[in-house]
Image: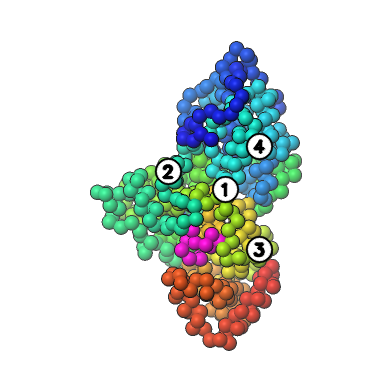
Amino acid sequence: MASGSGGEWTGQRPCGRFGSGRVTDRRMGIRPSMSDQPTKVLRLILGDQLNASHSWFDQVRSNVVYLIAELMQEQTYVRHHIQKTAGFFLAMEGFAKDLAAQGHEVHYATLDETAGFESLPEFLVDVMRRGGISHFEYQRPDEYRLRKQLSDWVAQSGVIARDFSTEHFFLSDEALGDYFHSGKAYRLEHFYRKMRERFDVLMEEGGPLGGQWNFDAENRKRLPKGIEIPEPLMFCNDAEDAVNRLKRHGVETLGALDGPLGWPVNRAQALSLLTDFCLRMLPFFGPYQDAMTHRGWSLFHARVSFALNTKMLSPQEVCDAAIRAYNERPDEIGLAAVEGFVRQILGWREFIRGIYWANMPEYADRNELEAQGELPHFYWDGQTKMACMQQAIGQSLEFAYAHHIQRLMVTGNFALLLGVHPDQVDAWYLGMYIDAIEWVEMPNTRGMSQHADGGLVGSKPYISSGRYIERMSDHCRGCAYKVSARVGDSACPFNVLYWDFLDRNSARFAKNPRMRMMIKNYERIDADERVAITAAAKSLRARRHEL
Ligand code: FAD
Ligand code: SF4
C-alpha cells in the first residue's frame, strides 16, 4: 500500500464518474452519482482522526464525500466506559457538523444506520454502492487492528484506494523506523533527547535549555499539607441522545454518566482546557505529577489525553502552549515544570507509539512473566478495603480518568504483584479510560506497567510495596490495612505481594542492576518470615476478590 502524506491509488477497478453533493441526510444516505460529474471519492474519518488542520480540508472538493460513522465493531471489541463512548460520539458528530459548515459534503452515520453491519468494510461497501462511489481514501489508523482491517479489505476487494498520514504526530510513520526496530529495547531518556534536538524544543546553543535535560530530582514531590487543589475545568455537554442510542442498540458499557459529559468534545473546548491547564496547573505539574490524594482526582494534570488522542489538539500545539506560558511567566512556572510536561508529550507519547508499531502484532501476546491470574472483581466496581485502590478505581468509574501514577503504581502495580494475566489487565485499561486507544494503552499497560514485554519499554518492572504509596499519598492513613505490616491479617496487601513477587522472580532479575537492591533487601528477611510471606500471598490470591 502506498504511504506518505498521500499515497498512490491502489486497486484494479477503473475510475467511475460520479456526481457531487452537499450535506447528506442520515436516513436518506449519501447521494448517488451522476454520470457527467468527476470521479467521486469517499474519504473515511475515524473517531480518533478529528484533525481539523488536516490537509484534506484545505479546499472544498465537490467530488469528495466525508464519512464519519459510529460503528458497532468499535463498541464491542472491548467493553468501554460510557463516558468514553459518549465522548467519541459527541466529538465525531461535532466534527462532522463543523466540516459541513465549511462547505464539505459529509455523511454522519449513527449507530441507527450502521448497527446492522458487522464490520467497517461491510458498511463501506454499502455506502459506496449506494453513492455509486468507486474511489476510497483513508488516513492510516493508529491501531494495528483497524489498519490491518482496512488494508486487507483494500487488497482483497480491489477497491481503488489511497491512504494518507493523519498529520498528527511529531514523527511520521516513516520516521518511526529511524528510531525503533522490532524486539529491541529502547530507553525513553535517549529517545527524548534526540527528539528535543530534532524538533528544536527547549534547546539553546545546541544544548538543553538551562543546561540540564532532566529535572526529575526537582519533581516527584509529595503534596504539601494545605496546598489548594484547583477544581478541574469541566464542560456541560448533553450526551443524552448518544447514551440513548447506545441503550437502543444494546451496547454494554461500564462506569457512570450521571448528567452532562464533562470532557471536551470539540476544538474550542479542547483549547479552553489547554489554556486553563497552562494558567492554573502547569506551575505545579512538575513537582506534584506523582502525588496522589483523596482530595482531588486530577490534581495538576492536564487531562488533555482525550483531546490529543482524538486529534482535536496536536502534540505540537500542546507543547507550544506550555512553552509559551513558561516564556511569559518564567518565575511562576519554572523550567522543571515545563520540561516535565514536554517530556510526557514529545518524549513518552511518541516513544510509546514507536514501541507499538515496531512490535505489533506479536506485542499483543507477550507475557514474559507468565502471569495467569484473574483480575479481582473489585476492579469493575471499586468495592475494596484498600483505600488507594478504592480511590483509583472509584474515580475511574466516575470520570473515566486516573492520572499516570494511579494507573502505574496503584492499579497496575497491584495487578502485576498479584500476577494477573496481561490480557485481562489490557482489557480493563482499554475499556476504562477516556483516552484509551490501543496504540498508547497497550505499551503502557502490557509493557511499562506489567513488564510483559520483557523490558522493551522499561528496564525493570514498576513494582513497589505500600511504602511508596504511603510516601506519595494520603491514602494509608484512612485504610483498613496497615502499611507498616509485612505479614498478618491486617498487613497491606501491596507489602505481602511485593515481597512475594521478589521471591518468585529473584532468579529472573538477579542480573538486572536496577533490581539488585530490592532483591538484596528481600534476602535480608529471615527465613521464617519469608515462609510466612509466601503463605500470606497464597492466601491473598485465594481471596483476591474480597480484599
Ligand atoms: P498529564 O499527566 O497531564 O500528561 C500530559 C500528556 O502527556 C498526556 O495527556 C499524554 O498525552 C502524555 N503522556 C503522559 N504520559 C504518557 C505515557 N506514558 N504514554 C503516552 N502519553 C503520555 N495514556 C493514554 O493516552 N491512553 C491510554 O490508554 C493510556 N493508558 C495507560 C495505561 C497505563 C497502565 C499507564 C501506566 C499509563 C497509561 N497512559 C495512557 C499514559 C498516561 O497515564 C496518560 O496519558 C495520562 O494519565 C493522561 O492524563 P493527562 O492528560 O492528565 O496527562
Ligand atoms: Fe494502599 Fe496499603 Fe496504603 Fe492501604 S495501606 S492505602 S492498601 S498502600
Label 4: which residue?
120
Element type where label 2 sits in the image: helix
Q: Is residue 455 magenta?
A: yes
Q: Which residue is mark 2?
A: 175
Three-letter residue code for mark 2: Ala
Distance, label 1 to label 3, CA atoms, is: 20 Å
Q: Earlier in the sequence, mark 2 or mark 3?
A: 2
Q: Say which residue appears at 36% left-offset and 63% top-offset.
A: 218
Residue assigned mark 3? 375
Q: Earlier in the sequence, mark 1 or mark 3?
A: 3
Where's residue 537, x and y in %?
62, 76
**Mark 3 crowd level (few <14, some 14–19, many ≥20, 10 Å Cα):** many
Q: As displayed, is residue 253 above or below residue 116?
A: below
* Left or right: 418, with 111 as reference point: left
Task: Please report contact status of discs 3 and 4: CB closer than 8 Å, yes or no.
Answer: no
In magenta segment, residue 342: no
Residue range of the region highlighted in magenta in the rendering: 451-462
Q: Nearer the viewer, mark 2 or mark 3?
A: 2
Which x, y percent locates residue 372? 65, 65
Point out the image quarter for the C terminus. Answer: bottom right
Nearer mark to the viewer, of 3 and 4:
4
Nearer mark to the viewer, of 4 and 1:
4
Q: Nearer the viewer, residue 32 or 272?
A: 32
Q: Give the spatial CA distance, label 2 vs label 1.
A: 21 Å
Question: Percent position (x, y) of residue 221?
Answer: 42, 65
